Amino acid sequence: MTSILRALLGGTAIALLAGSANAETLRLLTWGSYAPDELVQKFEEEYPDIDVEVTFSNNEEMIAKLRATGGTGFDLAQPSHDRVYAAQTEYNIYKPLDLSKIDVDKMTPKLVEGVKANTTIDGEVYSVPHQWGTSGIMANIKEAPDAKGWGDLCDPKYKGRTSMRLRRTILLGMGYALGYDPFSLYDDKAAYQEMLDKVTAKLIDCKQIIKTYWTGGDDLSALMLSGEVILSETWDSTAFKIYAENPDIVFIPPETGALAWIDTFTLPRGGQADDAAYKWINFVLRPENVKIMSASTGSLAAVPNAVELLPDDKRAAVEAAFHDRDIENLKFFANIPPGLEDMEGIALERIKAASN
């Protein structure tokens, strides 16, 4: 009897090891907070044959990583909708989606069509929407009650108490503040460079006003909640997250229009777990999982009634920030033509290198 039990237990151990060895790995290349532990654990419990491996990144790093590997190393990436077309046409790092495997009917039709319009190449669709939101400014309205737009970040009356992130968003926002329509200049590189030169000069002058440059949402939240900074460029989701802790800190859509982005689901060309990727996409679209995701991201999901699926504090923050006129005035990021980001990169380096 003992030998039989040993044999059975040994066989069970081998089977368990074999099962573990045969588990498929879904490698996500995504933004911080887009794969909360609670949701990953729930997914792995529902699909015990799939292990989820998460790498947090941003648009620039996603493109760089996939470009360096020829689109291998990851199974599902989440670039913003305006960062797919140029990256694909230049570097061939993605592959078309099989929309029949995605619950597209559960997504907001307007967002689906918008992303498809931006990411269709030779008749093939490369992305569908996941989360969306805007970039604008965040203010402690007790300290900066009159803040209305990007230009206020450089107002001398707020010297030493403002912040921004040195990425392309601030170039575009300040372009609007200076009277340009950056997206309309995308097809005219000379005109775009002229705008960049003006924006660069403005932001170099602004260095004497800025308290510090933030690099991440946690960094910015700490600055605002501590009172070190009272006015900053921000993602709306960061403002929504800290609204519950201090309702005087609100997101303000700039008077020229908040910059609207949509983060997507996109398959890297060398991904090896497409079926697992489709399962993850459909899994996070379920209302009960949207609630978990939106509690983590602070952003709106690309599903109908997304505001109702936000936690109460974040829903209140959205309602405090946006009015109908702000929604109508949104400026959605346009596809970036090849070469434009190199021009922007030079502008940002000039700003970084300039002394106060």
Image (tube, rainbow, N blue to C red):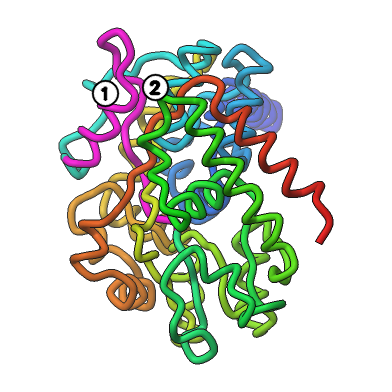
Q: Are marks 1 and 2 in contact (CB under 8 Å)?
A: yes
Q: Is residue 337 visible?
A: yes
Count how many numbered circles sit on residues in the image: 2
Q: Is residue 280 visible?
A: no
Picture coordinates of residue 169, whole percent (x, y): 52, 48
Q: Is residue 118 magenta?
A: yes
> Which region shows up in magenta?
110-135
Q: Residue at x 55, y 47 (%)?
A: 171
Q: Is residue 166 above or below residue 126?
A: below
Seen from this angle, which residue lies furthest bottom? 142
Q: Secondary structure at mark 2?
A: helix
**Label at residue 78:** none
Is residue 336 or residue 190 the one in the foreground?
A: 190
Q: Residue at x 62, y 21 (%)?
A: 73
Q: Secondary structure at mark 1?
A: helix
Is residue 217 or residue 26 the one in the foreground?
A: 217
Mark 1, residue position? 101
Picture coordinates of residue 356, whole percent (x, y): 81, 62
Q: Residue at x 18, y 52 (%)?
A: 304
Seen from this angle, which residue lies furthest top? 122
**Label at residue 275:** 2
